[in-house]
Image (cartoon, helix red, strand yellow):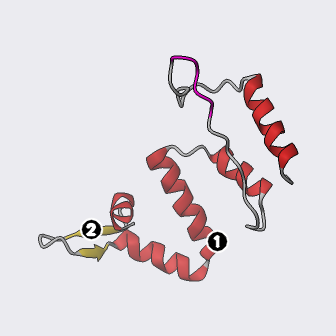
Amino acid sequence: MLSLLERFGWLSTDERARYNITALGNLVLAEASKDARNFKRRFAVHLDECYVVPGWLVARLHELNPGGQGEIILPAPPKLLGLGRRKWGDKKWPDELDEIVVLFCTSRLC
């Protein structure tokens, strides 16, 4: 977490590898104490910029589970014969994945 906050520019390290809050970090801290929701949004935006977490995925997960109750199942793509797992960038959703989801949901309460 500390290295992440450093990447955002909210913390810095000195010559003895101690963390110090930056001027920007102080502004973010003041904002967080006034409006926690806005801080969470800002944090999510920085995560998206650093790690390219698709915002639509986060929005969809929240839509599926707005109260933070229960669980959401994200099935792993099946191994393709002789090719290993599907590449992360392959966005195609084959019928086989629909079948896996339906099979799972009929065997449990979804």
Tell me what residue is drawn at x 64 percent, y 71 percent.
37
Question: Is 86 within the magenta?
Answer: no
Residue range in magenta is 77-82
Q: Is residue 97 found left or right of 79 in the rendered image?
A: right
Q: Is residue 21 found left or right of 58 in the rendered image?
A: left
Where residue 91 appears, x then y in whole percent?
63, 27
Density class for disc 2 (Cα within 10 Å; few <14, some 14-19, many ≥20) is some
Q: Amino acid at mark 2?
A: Ser
Tell me what residue is drawn at x 56 percent, y 58 percent.
44
Tell me what residue is drawn at x 74 percent, y 25 percent.
96
Can you say whether 91 is above or below 21 in the image?
A: above
Outermost top residue? 82
- Say which residue label 1 marks: 37
Local secondary structure at mark 2: strand
Q: Is residue 48 found left or right of 19 in the rendered image?
A: right
Specify the principal SS of the magenta part. loop
Tell me what residue is drawn at x 71 percent, y 27 percent.
93
Which mark is drawn over residue 12?
2
Can you say whether 97 is above or below 39 in the image?
A: above
